[in-house]
Image (cartoon, coloured by chain):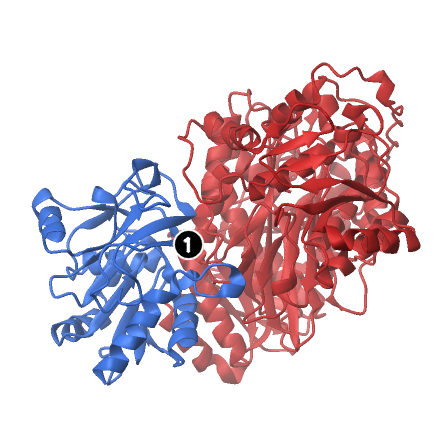
Chain colours: A red, B blue
Amino acid sequence: MRNEPKITPELVAEHGLKANEYQRLLALIGREPTFTELGIFSAMWNEHCSYKSSKIHLKTLPTTAPWVIQGPGENAGVIDIGDGLAVVFKMESHNHPSYIEPYQGATTGVGGILRDVFTMGARPIACLDFLRFGDPAHPRTRALVAGVVAGIGGYGNSFGVPTVGGSVGFHRRYDGNCLVNAMAVGIAPADKIFYAKATGVGKPIVYLGSKTGRDGIHGATMASAEFGDDAEEKRPTVQVGDPFSEKLLLEACLEIMAKDCVIAIQDMGAAGLTCSAVEMGAKGDLGVTLDLDRVPCREEGMSAYEMMLSESQERMLMVLRPEKEAEAEAIFRKWGLDFAVVGETTPSRRFIVRHGGAVMADLPIKELGDEAPVYDRPHVATAKQKIIKAEEVAPPISTAAAILQLIGSPDLCSKRWVWEQYDHVILGNTVQRPGGDAAVVRIEDGPKALALTTDVTPRYCEADPVEGGKQAVAESWRNLTAVGARPLALTDNLNFGNPERPETMGQLVGCIRGIGEACRALDFPVVSGNVSLYNETNGRAILPTPSIGGVGLIDDFTKSGTLTFKAPGEAVLLIGEAVGWLGQSLYLREICGREEGAPPPVDLAAERRNGDFVRALIREGLASAVHDVSDGGLLVALAEMAMASGIGAALAGAPFAAHAFWFGEEQGRYVMTLPQAEAEAVVARADAVGVPVKRLGVTGGDALTLGDERPILVAKLCEAFESWFPAYMGAPPAASPEAGRTES
Amino acid sequence: MRSAVLVFPGINRERDMARTLRLISGQESAMVWHAEPELPAGTDLVVLPGGFSYGDYLRCGAIAARAPIMDAVRRHVKRGGLVLGVCNGFQILCEAGLLPGVLMRNNRLKFICRDVYLKVERSNSPFTRGYNAGQVIRVPVAHGEGNYVADAETVARLEGEGRVLLRYVSPTGALDPNWNVNGATNAIAGILNEHGNVLGMMPHPENHVEPELGATDGRGLFAGLVDHFKQAA
C-alpha cells in the first residue's frame, strides 16, 4: 500500500465520516483502513448512497401490489402493464451539482437516470424533469434556469428520448439550492428484466462504456453536505456528461441483453466503480475482486483511490456469461466502446481491489453496504397552522385583475420557454405534449399508452408535512386520472434540508407519513425513489419538497382526456366540493402577499371517489374535456382550458365570497365539459354515488364571463400567460401554433 | 419502394423514420450501418435520418459525412437514385458536398422543438408530388443548428433554379421573420441538389403522419415518394 497518505482524524473528517462512524469502521475491519479503503467507506456510507437518515422511515411506505414486479432497492422500479411488457422507471435528484455547475449538473442528472432504466433492460421512452429555482429576483436564478434547461435538453435531445413533462417553480427558499429531479421511463419485456445481483463464482466482471477519468471524485459525498459560501469551489466534484457515449452504451447494452450475455449488470452512478461492484457482490452474497490495472483510463497515473471514487459518466459494470465473452466484446467494439474484464466473482464475500501488484483494499463486502450506519434522528413535528377563513382575507383587487395577475405569475405562467428546448416529439409516440395534466406517451404501436406526471406543492409541505405529503400523491393520482389513466405506481424524490436538525427531520418524517397514507388509500405504491438531504446553504433549508413521479396506464390512447374545451355550447361541471380554502393558496401569496395558514386538507376517500367517477366518464367517451383543479384554484383551471382552445365560457356568479370560490385550492376536484344533452344524466349519476357536482356554466364566446361581471378576454389571458417567462429570460416572444397551451 | 435508412453512431430518429416508411409504403426499410461499403442491391430511396451523429461534436454532420457508406450514397446519387436527408441527415448531406450551403446555429441560439408551417414551393418533384404547389403544411422541428446559410451566389442559384422546395412561413403562407423558426436565409427549410434527386430538410415530416396522434401533414412527402416509384415501375 505504497504512496498513500497517512490516516489522520482530519482526513477522516474530510471524508464526511463522523467520529462514531469511523469507530464503527475500525470495529468492522479490526485495523486502520488504507487511504483507498477510507475512500471506499466514505463513498458507501455517505447519506446519498446509504440513506442512513431516511431508511427507517422509508420502510413504512407501501411498495407492493399485484402489478409490481420490482419495488425499491434496484436501479429502478418495475411494474407489469400486460401484453408481456413492463414499465421501468425512477426519479433521481442532481440538486447539488446543478447548483454548482448548472449545465453539467443537469446533463449528468438526466444521463444517470437514463442509465438506471436501461441497466434493467428497458428502452427509455420518456423523461420528465421537476425543477425548482430561487426567487426570480435573486441574481443567480436566471443563469441557473438557463443552464439547467439547456443541460436537460442537451442530454435528452442528443440521447434521443422525448422530454414530455415536468414542473418548474420558483421560491426564495431555493435561492441557495436549486432542485433538479430527473425522471426516466422505459419499456422492457416483463420476463427479461436485468438485476444487479451477481450469481455464480468465478464469473468475469466486465467494465463497459467510457473511460475512467478524474472527474466527479467525491461527488456523492459533496451531495451529502450543506453548502457554505464556498459552493463554487466544489466545481471539480461535478461530472461531465456525454450523451453520445450514452446513446452508444444504450444500444450496445440492449444488444448484449438480447443475446443473453448478461448475468448481472449495474450502472456506475454515485461512487462509480465502488458502489456498483459492492452492490453486485453484496446482493449476490459473493465476493468481488477487481484488478484496477485493467480499468480503461482516460488519464495516466490514476491511483486506486481515484479510480474507485471517480464518477466519470456513461460506464457500466456487468457480470458476464463466460461463454459469451467474444460475442459481447464484438458488440461493444462495433459501437466503439470500451470492454474490459476487470475482475471476477469469488466465494469469499470480500471486496478486494488490486493495483500495481498490491492489494489496495480488502474489505467485508456485505458490511460495506448492509452495515452502513442507520440513524433514528430526533425529529419534531411541525406546529399546525391556523385555518384561514375567507372573511379574514379582504380581496385587494377585482377577480378579473387577480386572474390576469395569477396566470402571468412565475409559478403559473406558460413554461413554453422551457419545454420548447426539449425534443418532446422524438420516437413518434407523444400523444399529449407538455402542458396538459399529464403527458401521454403511446407504447410501441399502441393502443396502450402511459400517462406520466411529476407533482408536489412545497408550500403545503412546509405548512403541514403530513397533509402536504398526502397532497403530493393525491395530485399525482389526480393528474393521471384527468387524462383517463389508471394510476399504477410512483417514484418519489425526497428533497429536504439538513436531517441533523430536528425540525427538518420532522418535515421528512411527516411527509413520508403523508405519502404512505395516500399511497395506501389510492392503491398507488412506491416502487423506486431517491432521497436528497442537506439542501441547505448557510443554515437556510429549502422548502420540504417530496416530488412524486406518477405512472398510469391508458388502455386506448385515442380515448385519453385533454383539458382543451372542444366546442362552444357544452356544459361545464365542477366535480368535487367548493368551500373556498384560501390558506396557503397562490391567491393569498401572489395577490395578498401572505404565505400563511393551514393548507387544504386531503380527504383521500373523496379523492378516490371523485377520481374514479371522472375516469369512468372519460373512458366512456362522455367527458369532452377534463382538467384537475390545483394551484391557483378553480378560475385558473378554467382559464387554462379556455386558453388551450381559444373558446371562452359563460359561468354563473360565485355562490359565496368570489375570491374564495374562484381561487380556493380545496383538493379532489376536476373541471369537466360534456354535451349539454348529457349533463343532466351525469349529474344524476354523480348524485347517486355521492360525488359532489355543480353546473358552472356553458362554453362559448371569446371570454370568460363570471355572472354579470365584465368579460375577461381569452386573448388577454393568453398574453399574460405567455409573456412572463420569455420576458424574464430576455427572449423574443415566440410565434407558435400552440400559443396558449397551458400547464398542469 | 425499397428504402434504406442509414444508421450512424448517435443517430436517434432512425426508428421514427423506419416506422413511417413502413406505415406508408407497407414495406420494411433496410437499416444500413455506417461502416458498410454498399447499399442493399435495388435500393430506391436512401434516407439519412435525424439525430446527433458522433454527438455533433466537431461540426454537425462533419464526421458522418466521411463514413464508408457515404461513397455508396454518392454512387447512388450519380445513378439518379433518390436521397432524403432530414435534420442531421440534411447537415450530413451538406458536409458531404451533396448539397450546397451549411446549417448554422439557430438565430435565437437555442435548441427548439415546435410545430412550424412550411410552404411547399413546387409539387413537380418526387418528394413533393403528394402536395399542391403553394400548399402550407404543419410539421415539427427539433434542432439547435438549422439556420441555413450559403453565399449570395449559391442562394441566387437555388432560388433561380427553383431548388428551394420548402420554406418557413406563417399559417397563411406569408413570409414573416417571426415564423422563420431558426433565422434561415430566405426562410429556407429544404433544398434540392441540381439534379433534383437529393432533398435535405430540417423539419421532421416523419413525426406527423398518424391521424391518431393529431397531425398528418407529413404523410404527403412519403405517399408522394411511394407514388413516384409505383409509376416508375
Which quadrant would the N terminus of chain B be assigned to in this image? bottom left
- Residue A596: image quadrant is top right
Instruction: Provide the residue designation for mark 1.
Output: A158
Total labels drawn: 1
**Front residue (pair A520, A429):** A429
Q: Which of B118/B4 is in front?
A: B118
Relative to residue B197, is residue A517 depicted above or below? above
Is B175 situated left or right of A638 in this image?
left
Q: Residue at 68% x, 74% y: name it.
A: A347
Q: Is residue A474 left or right of residue A738?
A: right
Q: Amino acid at mark 1?
A: Ser
The image quarter containing residue A95 is top right
Residue A657 placement (x, y as % from top left): 82, 23
- Local crowd size for mark 1, using a 10 Å CA cut-off: few (<14), some (14–19), many (≥20): many
B61 is higher (above) or lower (below) than B2: above
* Residue at screen point 18% across, 68% down: B197
| Depth order, front residue of B47/A392 | A392
Specify the subunit that label 1 lies on. A
Residue A7, percent from left and from top: 62, 41
Left or right, A146 with reference to A525: left
Residue at screen point 42% across, 26% down? A730
Residue A317 horizontal/vertical position (percent):
54, 65
For the question of whether residue A59 can be seen, the reply is no
Q: Name the spot of residue A3 as percent of width and height, x first.
A: 49, 47
User: Looking at the figure, which quarter contains the C terminus of chain B?
Assistant: bottom left
Q: Residue at x 77, y 44 (%)?
A: A573
Is residue A117 visible in this depiction of the protein? yes
| Numbered disc 1: secondary structure | helix
Task: Tell which of A624 and A189 is nearer to you.
Answer: A624
